[in-house]
Amino acid sequence: MASKALIDLGVWHGPQEVDLVMGSDVTSRAEDDKKSFSVVNLSGTDETSSVELLDLLFAVIARDLSGDPSETYDRESIQAILGEGFAKILLLSENYPSIPASLHHELLAKLIKLYFSDEAEELQRLKQCLSVFFEHYPALTVVHKRCISKAFIPVIRSMWPAIYGNAGGSSFVVSNLRKRATQASRFMLQMMQAPLYMKETETEEESARKNLSENTDNDFENGEEGLAIRIGAELPKKKTAAEKAYLAGLCKIAVLLHFRISEQGAIKCMRGLLKHTAASVPTEKELVKELNKMAAHLKDLDKEPDKELSQDQANYIKGRLQLEAEIGVDDLMAELATPAPRSTRPSRPATSRRQVRRNKESSDEEDETSPISIAQPPPSAVSSRSQRASKTAALSKMSMKTAPIIAEEDEEDVDENVSDVTTEDDSDDDDF
């Protein structure tokens, strides 16, 4: 009940008003000075009386996400209440100017991890609430897309197993954790690429002009370009198997992002980062091909592909995106180059099939016409052949001699038979 009462007061009156009533000194703090939530010791009652409302509630939901299920408090109720409250604050962030914009991505990251956690199956009411929230949140304004882009890397870092101190486990457990992190990354990609809502009083042309005006030059931090650069700058120092799989998962999201031709600085920056990105996943052949295609597409979009990116431009991009890693000009100028591997087979002269065929035919003709190329049979073979030829000739002569004799005998037999027949006929005629 205490969590519900506090979140309702914060949503209704605003967190700053609640902090003033509780005695917290927030008047001297500038609106954007706070970059992250303060660490709160929930076991000390004296300390919690002076903390700000959002710090207190964020500490409670963070403890519940990683706490022991055997504790006595109702974790399901607290997570559901605080999750719905944070969703309302983010959805209506324009109504809470006292909440620094630098804290929005941390709240969003917490909600995404809660939505994809194993306990989400037990939190059906909260899951339904968050599904509606995630459907509307990215379509309201481009500022929300900037928040999604900023929360992407922290979310995937915290969900990917065996990196940055995350727990690993057996191959089965690691596989399931990677699938869950991959689902979260694709889910956030869909939110980044979701179109903005069109107001009821706007026509389609007005909405298109509005989107075009919001997506002007130097607006990469609110678009997909900013997310691509964040992914390209994510290069762990160690190259373990888990980290290589993590980078491969990020690259599979990067190749699905789109760049606007108006963002020339972001295009040049990403062209340089792709070199190191491809070098970090050399075994992923299909992924390297996709990165090559992306590099070629970015080169086509670059209006001045031969012009170098200055260090001031690199520092400007780093500052706008609030990147932790340094972006140097030397790193950005080398384009993506993946030469084909050299063959280990010995080199052969470059001759065409037609030339080989012609050479073969000419050699056959030379063999037929050249007397030197005729093979001489051995003497024994010659003698045996001559004996066979003489025998064949003798047999043919003998057959020729016997053939007329047989023919003459046949003729004599025929004449005798004829004469016999004629004599018999003559005798018969005499009788008549």
Image (spheres, rainbow, N blue to C red):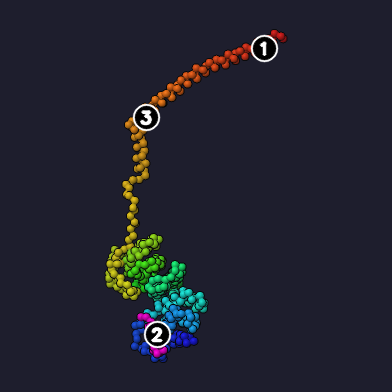
Q: Using the image, tell me which numbered label, if any, was put on residue 41.
A: 2
Q: Quadrant of residue 233?
A: bottom left
- Which amino acid type is shown beneath numbered disc 2? Asn
- Which amino acid type is shown beneath numbered disc 3? Pro
What is the quadrant of the C terminus in the image? top right
Q: Which residues are magenta?
A: 35-56
Q: Position of residue 6 (x, y in %)?
A: 45, 87
Q: CA distance from mark 3 to mark 2?
A: 108 Å
**Sooner in the amino-acid sequence: mark 3 or mark 1:** 3
Q: Within the magenta stretch, is there residue 20?
A: no
Q: CA distance from mark 1 to mark 2?
A: 152 Å
Helix, strand or loop at mark 3: loop
- Secondary structure mostly taken by the magenta-highlighted segment of the chain: loop
Q: Which residue occupies 34% across, 37% down? A: 363
Q: Is residue 190 visible?
A: no
**Front-lying residue, 35 or 43:** 43
What is the tally of numbered marks visible in this picture?
3
Q: Position of residue 44 (x, y in %)?
A: 40, 87
What residue did someone put label 3 on? 377
